[in-house]
Amino acid sequence: MNERRSAARAEDSSWRPAVNPWLITAAVMLATFMEVLDTTIVSVALPHIAGSLSATTDEATWVLTSYLVSNAIVLPASGWFARYFGRKRFLIVCIIIFTISSFVCGIAGDLAILVIARVLQGAGGGALQPLSQAILLESFPPEKRGMAMAAFAIGVVVAPILGPTLGGWLTDQYSWRWAFYINIPIGAVAVFMVNQFVEDPPYIRKSRPGKIDATGFALMAVCLATMQVVLDRGQQVDWFSAPWLCWFTAICICCLVAFVIWEIRSRDPIVNLAVFCNRNFLVGTSLIFMVGISLYAALTLLPLYLQTLMGYPALQSGMAVSPRGLGAFVMMPLVGYLTGKVDVRKLVGGGFVIVGISLWQFAGINLDISMWSIVWPSILTGVGLSMIFVPLSTVTMGTLAQEQMGNASGIFNLMRNVGGSVGISMVTALLARQSQVHQSELVSRLTRGDFMYLERGQSLQRLLERYNSQPDAMHLAQAGLYGQLQRQATLLSYVNDFRLLSFICFLCVGGAFLLKRVKAKGPTAVH
C-alpha cells in the first residue's frame, strides 16, 4: 500500500502538461485578470448605476456586496469542486457562468435583476483565482514557479489597481453597462484557450471524492455571507448600534466555530483545514491577509482623498493611482527570476519595508500637493507589492504536496480577499470617526480671542460684502471657515489611516522570517 502511494505521489510530482506552460499561463490568467478586474471596475460606476436604475447610492452598494458574498463562498470550496467535477471542466463552466452573468448585468433594467446577476457572477468568478494559481504551480517545474507566480501576481495585483481607471473611462465615454460588456469577448477567448491548452493532472483524474459535505458547505456559506455583509454595511448603519448587525455578527461567529469543529471531524471535508498544520502555509496566509488589508485599504483611501478633498474627477483620480500597477508590472518578472535565486524571506521582508515607506509618504499629504506627489509613492507601492506577492505565494505553497495545492490556493486567496474587506471597513470607519474627533479638537481652538481666526474671518467677510449684505456676508464667511475646518479635519484622518497601514506593514517584516526557506528543488511532501 505504501509503495503504491509512493509511486502515485512520484507520478504526480513528475507530471508535466503536454503543451508549453506559458500557453497555459495565458489561458488561465486571461480569465483571472477579467474576474479580479471586475471586483473594482464597478466601484466608480455606482453613482451612475444608481441614477440609471432609479435607486439610491446606498441601495446600489448591494451591487458590490452581493458579488463579494457569493465570491467568498465559492473560493475556499473550489478545490473540492475541482476534484469532484474535474478541474478543467469546472474552470470552463465557471468562466461561462461569469461571462453570461456579465451580459445579464449589462442589460439589467432594474436593481433587483442586477444584484441577482452579480450573485451569479461572483459564484462563477470565485473559483477562477484559486484554480488558476493551482494550475500554474503544477504546470511549471519547481525551479520556475517563481516566474509562474509573477504571471499570476500581474493579474491579482495589477487588475484591481487598473479597475477604477478603466471603469471611470468606460463610464465617462460610453456607459456603466460597458463595465460588464467588456467581459464577454474576454470570457469567450478564455473558454477557447482553456479548452485547448489546460489538462487535468493524474491525481485529479483519479480523484473520487464522496458525497458533498453539505453541512460544512452550509456552515461556511452562512459564516462568510454574514461576515461580508457585516464588513460591507457596518459603517453605513453605525456598526453595533444596529440590532440586525449584532445578530449577523453572532451568527457569523457561531457558524465559524461550528464549521471548524465539523471540518476537523469530517472524513471528506469541503475545505481541508489540515493544511494549517503546515508552518509555511499558516504564516503565509496570515501575511497575505495583511497584504489584503494594506492593498485594498490604500486603493480605497487614495481615490476618496483625491475626489473629495482635491476635487479630482473619477478618471483623473484613477490615473493618479494607476502607476502603482506600472511599478508592479515592471518589477514582477525580476522578482519572479530572483525567487529561485535568493532567500525569498528577504524579498518578502524587503517588500513590506518598501510598502511601509510608501504608505508613510502618503501620510505626508496636504491640500496643496500635485499629482506627482501621489504618482511616485504609488510606483514604490507597486514595487513593494510585487516583492511580497510573488515569493510569498511560492514559499507558502512550497512545502505542500501537489494534491493539496487546489484546496490550499482556495484558502490562500480567500484570506487575501477577507483581508481586503477588513481593511476597507477598518479605514472607512476610522476615517468617519477620527474626522469627528479632529473637528472637535480644531473647533475648540477657534475662539474669538484667536487673532488669526478673527483676521481670516473679517477679510473673508469684507470680500463677500461686495456681493452680499453685511449679515449674509458674515454668515457666508463663517460657513466658509467651517468648511475649511472640516476639510482639514478629514485630511488629518487620512493621514492617521496611512500611518496605521504603514505601521502594519513594518510589523509584518518580522513575520516574513518565520517562514521556512524553500529550496529550489521544489516542494516536499507533507506526511
Image (cartoon, rainbow, N blue to C red):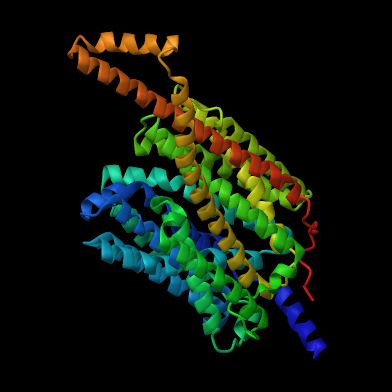
Quadrant of the snapshot with the C terminus: bottom right
| Residue 4 at x, y percent in the picture | 78, 88
The image shows residue 265, relative to residue 435, as above or below, that is below
The image shows residue 225, relative to residue 283, as above or below, that is below
Residue for point 67% across, 47% down: 335
Residue 31 visible in rendering: no
| Residue 78 at x, y percent in the picture | 54, 73
| Residue 515 at x, y percent in the picture | 77, 56
- Nearer to the camera, 173 or 422: 422
| Residue 149 at x, y percent in the picture | 63, 56
The image shows residue 117, relative to residue 346, as above or below, that is below
Q: Is residue 425 left or right of residue 510?
A: left
The image shows residue 5, relative to residue 148, as above or below, that is below
Residue for point 36% across, 30% down: 311
Residue for point 38% across, 35% down: 307
- Nearer to the camera, 11 or 179: 179
Q: Is residue 519 left or right of residue 245?
A: right
- Nearer to the camera, 286 or 42: 286
Residue for point 45% across, 30% down: 439
Quadrant of the snapshot with the N terminus: bottom right
Residue 313 visible in rendering: yes
In terms of image quadrants, where is residue 518?
Answer: bottom right
